[in-house]
Amino acid sequence: MELVHSGKIRDLYADGPDLLLVASDKISVYDVVLPTPIPGKGKILTQLSLWWFARLAGIVPNHVISATDIPPQWAGRAVRCRRLEMIPVECIARGYLAGLGLDSYRASGSVSGVPLPPGLAEGSKLPEPVFTPSTKATSGHDEFVTFDDVVAELGAGTASELRRITLEVYQHGAELAASRGIIIADTKLEFGWAPDRSLVLADEVLTSDSSRFWAAEDWQPGRPQRYLDKQFVRDWSSTITSWDRRPPGPPIPAEVVDATRRRYVEAYERITQEPWPED
Ligand code: Q0Z
């Protein structure tokens, strides 16, 4: 099979007219991939994404063709999908302030040109979710663009549809996750055009690799939040004073790997209310 794109965590293959999106067990902290995998992570996040796609199908069609017509070596951690013409805008919805959104708010009081009220802190809940699109900058890191920039690039109709669908997906997902003890602070969605020019939700959806998942019981604005999945790795790595957060990262000890795997399983089980079958 032809490798179309290799990312840090996932790979994309072409299989005839289809694409296969293959998730690995790799984990990144502070944007650096560590040398030790988290066994099962690729499967857990793939199955969670598939669960969301099915749940969200009433809001937006998606790129999934099959979760089972997959070569055996990738069973459970790959999705066969329709090849779309991808839209070069990262469609981000935020309900809470963190990461680059927080940086932008501190610098300008706004994110993607959307003004936010004064007095918000790291981790604050926003008055209502906002659409904060970004584009891949040549530097590598994403750069916020305004809604008007999206209009200029894609037209008013498409820009409005992307904003509407992104906020609807976030609102629905965040509400369901909140009822199950997980705050989805923000999420990044990717869309493509089908041959008939309809908008299709692509890539992965509402996983902890495309979103910030916080344990609701630990949420406390005014400080960096604990990540539901990666906090053990982040906390442990911050004790490795010889690591400067540049590649290569240090190997992860077995007990941190196990605790982290349990958190991925916990997030899957809390959201889907189904036991993880391989636990
Ligand atoms: C997704 C990506 C990577 C995983 C292109 N249905 C689609 N049609 C066309 N293109 C894509 C998709 Cl999902 C597509 N990506 C992002 C890169 C591993 C996802 F290396 N790029």
Image (cartoon, rainbow, N blue to C red):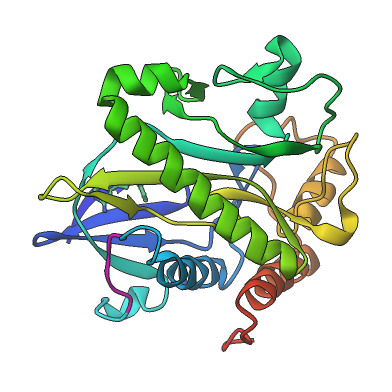
Identify the residue shown where x is 86% and y is 22%. Answer: 119
Give x and y (percent) for residue 228. Answer: 75, 58
Out of 73 and 156, give the one closest to the viewer: 156
Identify the residue shown where x is 84% and y is 49%. Answer: 235
Identify the residue shown where x is 50% and y is 51%. Answer: 168
Which of the 4 quarters of the picture holds residue 136?
A: top left
Which of the 4 quarters of the picture holds residue 31?
A: top right
As for residue 12 lying within the magenta part, the answer is no
Q: Is residue 49 visible?
A: yes
Identify the residue shown where x is 73% and y is 73%. Answer: 262
Q: Is residue 189 visible?
A: no
Q: Is residue 133 rendered to the left or right of residue 247?
A: left
Q: Quadrant of the N terminus?
A: bottom left
Identify the magenta region: 62-67
Out of 232 and 147, give the one closest to the viewer: 147
Above/below status of 278 relative to 241: below
What count of labels does the image hold?
Answer: 0
Give x and y (percent) for residue 45. Answer: 52, 66
Out of 12 and 169, give the one closest to the viewer: 169
Above/below status of 65 relative to 69: above
Above/below status of 238 relative to 277: above
As for residue 65 lying within the magenta part, the answer is yes
Q: Is residue 15 rendered to the left or right of residue 8?
A: left
Q: Is residue 213 rendered to the left or right of residue 91?
A: right
Which of the 4 quarters of the picture holds residue 149?
A: top left
Give x and y (percent) for residue 219. Answer: 86, 50
Q: Quadrant of the C terminus?
A: bottom right
